[in-house]
Image (cartoon, coloured by chain):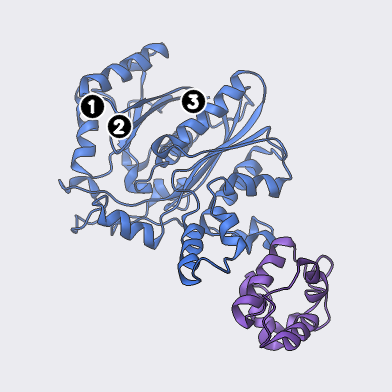
Chain colours: A blue, B purple
Amino acid sequence: MYIRAAAGISPQSSFEQILADPVPVTGSRLQCMEPDYAKLIDPKMIRRMSRIIKMGVAAAIQCLEEAGERMPDAIIAGTAYGCLGDTEVFLQKMVENDEQLLTPTAFIQSTHNTVAAQIALLLKCHSYNNTFVHRGFSFENAMTDALSLLKDGQMKTVLAGGIDEITDTSHTILKRFGLYKKEPFPAGNIFQTGSKGTIAGEGASFFVLQSEASGNDYAQLTGMDTFYKPASGEEIRQHISAFLERQNINREDIDLVISGENGDMKNDAVYDMVYQTVLSGIAHIPFKHLSGEYPTASAFALWLAANILKAGKLPGGIQTKKTPVTVLIYNHYQHIYHSLYLLAAC
Amino acid sequence: MADLKKQIIAQLNLKDLKPEDIGDDQPLFVEGLGLDSIDALELIVLLQQEYKIKLANAEEGQSVFRSVRTMAQYITDHQGKSTA
């Protein structure tokens, strides 16, 4: 399967910015840098769209434009939180108005499948449209669906993406649960805190996936896999080894690993373990200091990997023996949802 | 009617419009402001929230929401009366 185009709205304005001067982490939250939506979306549609819908639709439109595709055979999204902003508006009005006089727009737009639906409305695309809401596997299951449709030969071009937002309310609540850092940490470096908690993040990343090479692709997605709630480090190592074996690839063939360290001591211990064992000796970079942590952050990692392979350049001044040709993404969300993606340069 | 226009703009999130951009007799739907059926529901909520007026039946909506003037007239005729 080939990644024909990749576009994202994230706390970083572009891949070039990540290479040159990434936005540093300064607090417990990284917010997206949003484009001028009026240039991308019909103003009549924008007025009803909440922030996450605009982010998702804009990323999808940019992606399709880059691929030169007007009408994908399928639109598939993954989101864990859905449209939190409109959900909050709707619930707030329920309380304020004693469950009466509820405005329809906030209700309609608060459902998880709104982003994929709005993309379809904008494109007038009546094809397959699906949204996966499976917590830390939301994006992975969207991708699995997309790849299955392409592999079956039912479809040739699929638009797939992952989207999640953080709002003031959700950030406050999740921080109260202990998910995010409470104490200050070294400027710009979330990985040397030795403490609990991570950095809240958000983003919208979309991909045009095709079954055939176009000659101008970002990368080839040669494999992906997920595993759930591994019981031990040994089980994690076995899953990774088995995945590489199924892909007919040796550890030495991997030029770069992009992994999901997020600054939480317990979370990052998993990555330390794999880098000391099954993935030892391979150059590796984290990505969550750029995106923050969120259930569909692996979509940002895929966007980053695709850009690295297309540009042949690495962020953060990392040096590898040769220009990366084979990139592995290993991410887990809350040590429950583990995912692996293997990409190759085209 | 200027206040009503402000309320319509706020309720429907018509950010690019000012009250003076909406004509008193300009059709609100289709060829006029281009509003649609979801906007009609929002206008019903606006009448209830701001003026405590509940439309007696849905068929009235077409004539009530024809323009800002017809809305204002309906509000004037029904304010203080209970139609529930």
Q: Is residue B72 left or right of residue A337?
A: right
Q: Residue A321: image x %, image y %? A: 32, 26
* Image position of B77 with respect to A90: above or below: below
Given contact means CB atoms under 8 Å apart, are the residues at marks 3 and 1 in contact? no
Mark 1 chain: A
Q: Residue A56: image x %, image y %? A: 55, 49
Spatial distance from mark 3 to mark 2, Cα to Cα? 17 Å
Q: Residues within 10 Å of mark 1 (few under 14, many from 20)?
A: some
Query: Looking at the image, is mark 3 or mark 1 earlier in the sequence?
Result: 1
Mark 3 chain: A
Quarter of image, res A267: top left
Q: Residues within 10 Å of mark 2 (few under 14, many from 20)?
A: some
Query: Looking at the image, is mark 3 or mark 2 earlier in the sequence?
Result: 2
Q: Residue at x 47, y 71 (%)?
A: A96
Kindly identify the amino acid type of the residue bearing the numbered disc 3. Ala
Depth order, front residue of A31/A175? A175
Label 3 sits on residue: A345
Residue A36 in view of the camera: no
Q: Residue A320: image x %, image y %? A: 33, 29
Q: Nearer the viewer, mark 1 or mark 2?
A: 1
* Image position of A323 with respect to B65: above or below: above
Spatial distance from mark 1 to mark 2, Cα to Cα? 9 Å
- Viewport quadrant of the N terminus of chain B: bottom right
Where residue A284 is drawn, which disc sits there?
A: 2
Query: Looking at the image, is mark 1 or mark 2 earlier in the sequence?
Result: 1
Q: Residue at x 57, y 45 (%)?
A: A113
Label 1 sits on residue: A275
Residue furthest to the left: A194
Kindly identify the amino acid type of the residue bearing the numbered disc 2. His
Q: Nearer the viewer, mark 3 or mark 1?
A: 1
Given contact means CB atoms under 8 Å apart, are the residues at marks 1 and 2 in contact? yes
